[in-house]
Image: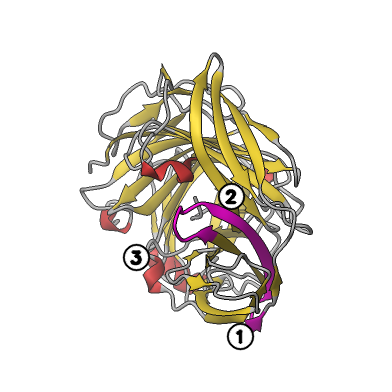
């Protein structure tokens, strides 16, 4: 799921205006021991969705355990906090109006590259004016009498194009380009207008621009049956016995293609519980030149708000079987309220290397709370802090565990498994 994630990267040219930043002042609740090494914490609060533009007037709150320090970011998002412990853990909270707050309860600055860059996007993507791109071209070789529809990142075709002859079929659609993509990968799928049977798919990649063209050739390889096997996850302390059997079954497993697996090339059609997990019957169209991946979303109510286990693993193009070994969803010690002076805890999950608590408000991500251990304590906040910057009275908290690899740019490396499991908790209460 995307969001406010702390990133410690080298940044240069941060102009820090100490006089501006000190307007917010500091709240002191004690004095640090004499032998603590101190450092100036410099950094910037940035919006990762719009080319890391600075986020002005954000709260940056440091809790050393002995003092609670707060400053506000300048017009360019930069901030500076002097005399912060360098070699012992501090808690860092960042919040800004209408944006996703973030809290990390155990940062050791000696282990970080300064200045810190802290990403903080708007909760609601409607705040952004994303550019659009018009994609057009032709599809050749699709079965006569079939219907074509298109999909890609953040796009699911609303119109179907009927293939009436063997001539190349013209197509055109418009998408919003979200984020800093340089290329856009999409798929064209054909289905039988009478039976609804999917007849195949093909994919194309274009450079991001105002307009782009791609002429797609339908492959002759046809569809590949795929058997997806999984383990049996334990969700919030209870083994998962069955999967959702609703019409949303296709969402339980998808087969995708592209550098980050953006284009859907197939999906699940049925499942069966077996002794040690699940067997999911699926199909897909292998497309030459594209990396493939398969996802498995294991839950008994895909449209509900219950615990789930999710896994995404690489798929060798043309493979007929693949195994997805998902993580258990955390078993919560308490599903109650979370707020000031409270701590959440849960059992450790085998294989998980990241723990996170997040808060939703009106179905939008309002706050991330990062932790290295299976518990989170609610952050201390200044007395004059407006709590609505984090969430109102109708926030709900969830616990997420995950496992994934990162590349040299600290981005998710999808050539390795990406695993996420979650358990919903209770309400956020101030």
Q: Which mark is residue 357?
A: none
Residue at x-position 70% and y-position 49%: 292
Nearer the observer, disc 2 or disc 3?
Answer: 2
Marks 2 and 3, how far apart at CA: 40 Å
**What range is drawn magenta here?**
191-213
Circle 1 residues within 10 Å: few <14, some 14–19, many ≥20 = few
Would residue 203 be counted in the magenta stretch?
A: yes
Residue at x-position 59% and y-position 73%: 51
Element carrying mark 3: loop
Give x and y (percent) for residue 409. Answer: 73, 56
Looking at the image, which residue sits at the far bottom?
210
Q: What residue sits right under mark 2 in the picture?
A: 266
Decide whether the magenta segment is chiefly helix, strand or loop: strand
Contact check, label 1 and label 2, Cβ < 8 Å: no
Q: What residue sits right under mark 1 in the picture?
A: 211
* Nearer to the camera, 175 or 349: 175
Nearer the observer, disc 1 or disc 2?
Answer: 2
Residue at x-position 51% and y-position 78%: 174
Q: Which mark is residue 97?
A: 3
Contact check, label 3 and label 1, Cβ < 8 Å: no
Marks 3 and 1, how far apart at CA: 35 Å
Element carrying mark 1: strand
């Amino acid at each position: 799921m995307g969001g406010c994630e702390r990133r410690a990267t080298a940044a240069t040219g941060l102009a820090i205006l100490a006089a501006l930043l000190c307007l917010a002042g500091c709240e002191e609740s004690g004095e640090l021991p004499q032998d603590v090494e101190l450092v100036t914490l410099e950094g910037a609060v940035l919006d990762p969705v719009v080319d890391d533009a600075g986020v002005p007037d954000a709260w940056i709150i440091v809790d050393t355990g002995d003092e609670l320090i707060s400053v506000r970011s300048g017009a360019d998002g930069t901030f500076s906090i002097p005399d912060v412990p360098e070699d012992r853990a501090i808690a860092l909270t960042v919040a800004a109006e209408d944006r996703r707050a973030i809290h990390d309860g155990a940062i050791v600055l000696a282990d970080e590259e300064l200045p810190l860059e802290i990403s903080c996007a708007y909760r609601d993507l409607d705040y952004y004016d994303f550019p659009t791109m018009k994609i057009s071209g032709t599809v050749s070789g699709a079965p006569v009498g079939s219907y074509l529809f298109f999909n890609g990142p953040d796009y699911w075709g609303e119109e179907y194009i009927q293939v009436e002859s063997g001539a190349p079929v013209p197509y055109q659609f418009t998408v919003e380009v979200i984020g800093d993509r340089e290329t856009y990968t999409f798929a064209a799928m054909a289905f039988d207008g009478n039976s609804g049977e999917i007849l195949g798919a093909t994919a194309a990649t274009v450079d991001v621009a105002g307009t782009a063209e791609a002429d797609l050739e339908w492959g002759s390889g046809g569809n590949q049956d795929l058997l997806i096997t999984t383990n049996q996850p334990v969700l919030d302390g209870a083994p998962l016995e069955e999967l959702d059997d609703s019409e949303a079954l296709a969402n339980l497993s998808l087969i995708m293609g592209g550098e980050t697996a953006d284009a859907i090339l197939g999906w699940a059609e049925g499942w069966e519980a077996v002794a040690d997990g699940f067997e999911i019957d699926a199909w897909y169209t292998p497309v030459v030149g594209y990396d493939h991946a398969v996802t498995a979303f294991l839950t008994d109510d895909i449209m509900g708000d219950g615990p789930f286990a999710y896994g995404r693993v690489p798929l060798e193009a043309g493979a007929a079987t693949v195994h997805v070994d998902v993580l258990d969803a955390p078993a919560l010690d308490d599903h109650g309220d979370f707020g000031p002076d409270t701590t959440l805890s849960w059992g450790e999950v085998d294989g998980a290397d990241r723990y996170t608590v997040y808060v939703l408000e009106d179905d939008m991500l309002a706050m991330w709370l990062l932790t290295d251990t299976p518990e989170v304590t609610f952050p201390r906040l200044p007395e004059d802090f407006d709590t609505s910057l984090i969430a109102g009275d109708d926030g709900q908290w969830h616990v997420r565990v995950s496992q994934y690899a990162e590349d040299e740019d600290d981005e998710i490396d999808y050539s390795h498994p990406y695993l996420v499991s979650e358990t919903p908790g209770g309400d956020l209460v101030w």
